[in-house]
Amino acid sequence: MPARTTETLVTFRRPFHLSQFDSAQPAGTYRLVTDEEEISGLSRVAFRRVGTTLRLPSLETKGGPEQMVSIDASEFGIALAADGEER
C-alpha cells in the first residue's frame, strides 16, 4: 500500500501543552511530521493519516539531537488554533 510522509513547520506564539508532555512546551517553531497511507479501492486517490509526530528541539544546545514524540493530531490542531486566538 503506497504511503507518504509530509513535514510542515508550525509556529506557536505562546507556550502550549499536549497530553503527551508533562509540562508546557515553549513558544517557537516545530516540525510536524504526518505519515499517511493510500486508501485502496476508491475511484480516486485518497490518503488516511496513520501517524503524527512532533519534533522537539534539543534543550541542551542548538544543533543537538531532536526528540520525536508521537502526538494526537486532533489535540495538536486544537492547541494550534488556540494559539492563534486573540487573548
Image (cartoon, rainbow, N blue to C red):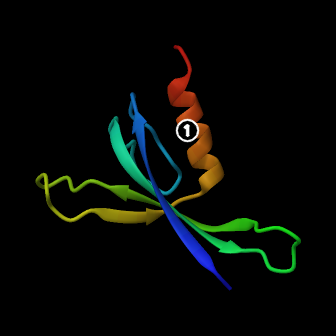
> Where is the N terminus found, in terms of image quarters?
bottom right
- Identify the residue shown where x is 34% and y is 35%: 27
Query: Residue 79 placed where, x, y %?
Result: 55, 38
Q: State which quadrant residue 58 falls in.
A: bottom left
Going by the image, does 56 lie left or right of 35? left
Viewer-nearest residue: 38 or 34: 38
Query: Residue 29 placed where, x, y %?
Result: 34, 41
- Identify the residue shown where x is 53% and y is 59%: 71
| Residue type of the residue flagged with mark 1 | Ala
Query: Residue 23 placed where, x, y %?
Result: 39, 46
Mark 1: few/some/many CA within 10 Å (<14, 14-19, 20+): some
Query: Residue 67 placed where, x, y %?
Result: 31, 64
Would you place residue 55 above or below residue 47 in this image? above
Residue at the far top: name it.
87
Q: Secondary structure at mark 1?
A: helix
Q: Which residue is mark 1?
A: 79
Going by the image, does 80 lie left or right of 22? right
- Identify the residue shown where x is 61% and y is 54%: 73
Residue at the far left: name it.
61
Would you place residue 61 above or below residue 49 in this image? above
Q: Is residue 22 visible?
A: no
Q: Is residue 5 visible?
A: yes
